[in-house]
Image (cartoon, helix red, strand yellow):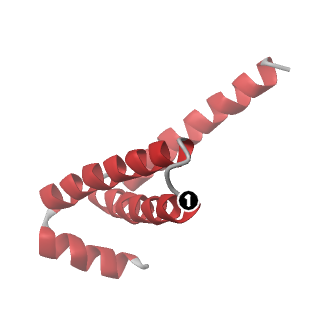
Amino acid sequence: MNNYTYNKIIKKYGKDAQCDMMIEKCAELIAALNRFKRGRTGLKPVLEEIADVQIMIDQMYILFDSFSINQIKERKIQLMIKRLEEEK
């Protein structure tokens, strides 16, 4: 999906509603992962929830400072790489 579509969604529902939806979708993913780990569901529901969360993350990039988010992500990835190298 492109930013044009996400912007239309955000404009229609608003920032607060989309933040609430992000929380809801994350909770649904957590529940699906727990059911999957316990063998109570298959992979498809987990994949569905991951897709929903990714859609909401894409909207969060628009609502919040995507440049800063990417900088923070890069720093965190570098820390993970450093930890992996230290564990060798």
Viewer-proximal residue among 20 and 77: 20
Residue that appears at 52% across and 63% down? 47
Measured as percent of width and height from the top left, residue 5 is found at 32, 81
Residue type (three-letter) at the residue carrying disc 1: Gly
Question: Is residue 12 shown left or right of residue 63?
Answer: left
Which residue is outermost to the front?
40
Residue that appears at 57% across and 35% down? 75
Circle 1 is placed at which residue position?
A: 42
Tell me the crowding category of disc 1: few under 14, some 14 to 19, or many 20 or more residues within 10 angstroms, Cα based: few
Viewer-proximal residue among 35 and 74: 35
Measured as percent of width and height from the top left, residue 49 is found at 43, 60
Residue that appears at 33% across and 57% down? 60
**Quadrant in which the N terminus is drawn:** bottom left
Question: Is residue 71 shown left or right of residue 7?
Answer: right
The correct choice, above or below, for 72 with respect to 23 in the image is: above
- Asked which secondary structure carries label 1, the reply is loop
